[in-house]
Amino acid sequence: MNKYQYILFLLGAILFLSCSASHTDTTLVAVTILPQQEFVEQIAGEFPIEIMVMIPPGASPATYELSPDQMRRISKARAYFKLGSGLPFENVWLEKIESLSPDMKVFDCSEGIEMISGTEHHHEGQEHHGQDPHIWCSPLNAKIMVDNITRGLIAVDPEHIKVYEKNAPIYKNKLDQLDLEIKNKLAIVSKRDFIIFHPSWSYYARDYGLNQVAMEVEGKEPHAHDLKKLIEISHEKNIKTIFASPQFNTESAEMIAFEIGGTVEYINPLAKSYISNLELVTGKLFKALR
């Protein structure tokens, strides 16, 4: 090997080791749902963070179970950003997740959020006692979640504090713009009630002066008399659109829509593209309520 070849060999070795170290040093963090992945990505910007989402696209937070591969990977995570709001998945799996990675730091995205809890009114005057876990469906709550995630990222990766502190306010400003856009759009609708199968949008409804009427109560399918009452409500309030989530059975929603001569519209609380998804949801609600 001549001197020139030796220099090229050394340069190649240095480049290889540099790339390997860079890959190894990538921060792995875990989140429960896709919208949280969006929040982490926006805070990190171009800085490479590996994000593990526990509930994959299309899966139900009420029934999803961790895969062996997820159990293996989570042991390497430096941080877990839990929703902390009582999502069934976390109620079942969080303790197991923490035991798989005892050195992993867990941060609560719900810290500082005013929960919808106590008594909620559903169809037929039923009352549901508990806490609504769907905190992320409100842009105002999302801003608080972004703050909590930012603090967590800084705690496990203080070296890049300037990156996180620069990007978080930029994204929060976008959430402010989204909030204003939704307020302006829904301020002029003539109806305020909407019927949905799974009650994912309580925080959204609270923030924008709407009334969510849930078909499903405490995870249970509506009975025949419940469906009859919902059909009566639909006629009384001139409701022609029944909303449903793609993660849940939609047969009951389709049945009511058929009986009232209406349609079923799908709005996804778990879509990753947070801002564009809430713009889409708002557009569908506006069309149904105007």
Image: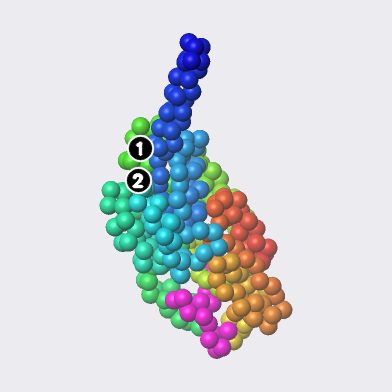
Q: State the mark number for residue 157.
A: 1
Q: Residue furthest front?
A: 1
Is residue 226 located in the magenta-colored stretch of the structure?
yes
Residue name at image x 47 percent, y 37 percent: 48
Where residue 148 sits in the image (x, y, percent)? 38, 47
Left or right of 143 on screen, residue 93: left
Q: Which quadrant of the figure has residue 96?
A: bottom left
Q: Amino acid at mark 1?
A: Asp
Q: Amino acid at mark 2?
A: Arg
Q: Point out the tag, 1 or 2, that comes first from the N-terminus.
A: 2
Observer-side mark, 1 or 2, equals: 2
Magenta segment, which residues? 209-227
What coloring was used for the rendering? Answer: rainbow
Q: Secondary structure at mark 1?
A: loop
Mark 1 in CB contact with mark 2 (< 8 angstroms)? yes
159 or 209, which lies in front? 159
Left or right of 178 on screen, residue 289: right
The residue tagged 2 is 78
